[in-house]
Image (cartoon, rainbow, N blue to C red):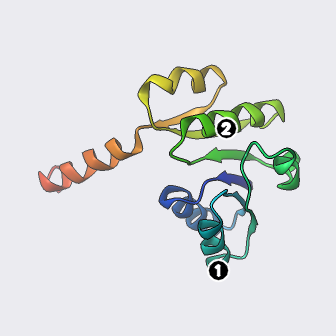
Amino acid sequence: MYLIILGAAPEGSSLIDLAIEDGHEVALIEKNEEQARAVLQKHDIKVFNADISDGEILEEANIQRADALIATTSDDSVNLMAMFLGKEYGINTLISMVNERTHQKMFERLGVKVLVNPELIIAKQLYRFANHEDD
C-alpha cells in the first residue's frame, strides 16, 4: 500500500513508523524543514518539504498511485485543503485529524474518515489508566 501523509508532528511521525513497520510505502509532505529532515534521518522514504497548497506537490508525491491520503496537522484548514485535493485526484481513502469538533461535518461531507480531537482521546485513555479501568 502507498500512503501519502501530510504532517510530521508526533501523530504523523508515529503513523509513518507504523506504516513502515507493516511494510507499506510512505511519502511525507511536511512544510517545516526541521521536521522533514528529522523524518529523513530516521526513514528512507520520499519527503517533500512543501506546503500542501504548493502547486504540483501532490503530483510530485505521485498521488495518482496513492492508496490513501492522511492529514495529521494541527491546522484543520490545511487538513481540509489536503482532503479536498485528494478528492479531486480521486483518492478513495481520505483520512484526517480534525482538531475542532465544529469542523467535523465539513470533512465528512467530502467522505473523509475523521479522528476528532485527538488530544481528548489520549487524555481519556490516560484517565482510564489512572482509574484502573483497563485492568
Instruction: Please tell me which residue lies in front, 8 or 93.
Output: 8
Picture residue at 11% right of the left edge, 51% below the top:
131
Residue, far bottom: 41
CA–CA distance in space, label 2 to label 1: 27 Å
Residue 99: mark: none
Identify the residue shown where x is 84% and y is 35%.
89
Residue 88 place in picture, x, y as percent = 82, 30
Location of residue 94 (image quadrant): top right
Find numbered disc 1 in the image and state the secondary structure of the residue it sits on.
helix
- Residue beneath disc 2: 94
Which residue is more in the foreground, 92 or 59?
59
Q: Position of residue 97 (x, y in %)?
A: 52, 41
Q: Residues within 10 Å of mark 1 (few under 14, many from 20)?
A: few
Residue 28 appears in view:
yes
> Which residue is at 68% across, 74% downward?
40
- Dot 2 crowding, Cα within 10 Å, few <14, some 14–19, many 20+: many
41 in relation to 77, above or below: below
Q: Which quadrant of the structure image shows residue 113? A: top right
Q: If you read the primary sequence from the N terminus, does the residue marked by circle 2 or circle 1 appear first?
A: 1
The quadrant the C terminus occupies is: bottom left
Q: Position of residue 86 (x, y in %)?
A: 76, 37
* Amino acid at circle 2: Leu
Q: Is residue 7 above or below residue 46?
A: above
Kindly indicate whether the residue at mark 1 contacts the one at mark 2 (C-beta within 8 angstroms): no
The disc labelled 1 sits on which kind of residue? Gln
Element at label 2: strand
- The label shown at residue 41 is 1
Query: Is residue 134 something that shows in the picture?
Result: no
Q: Is 88 left or right of 51, judged from the image as shown?
A: right
User: Which quadrant of the figure contains the N terminus?
Assistant: bottom right
Q: Is residue 6 above or below residue 81?
A: below
Front-most of residues 49 and 129 = 49
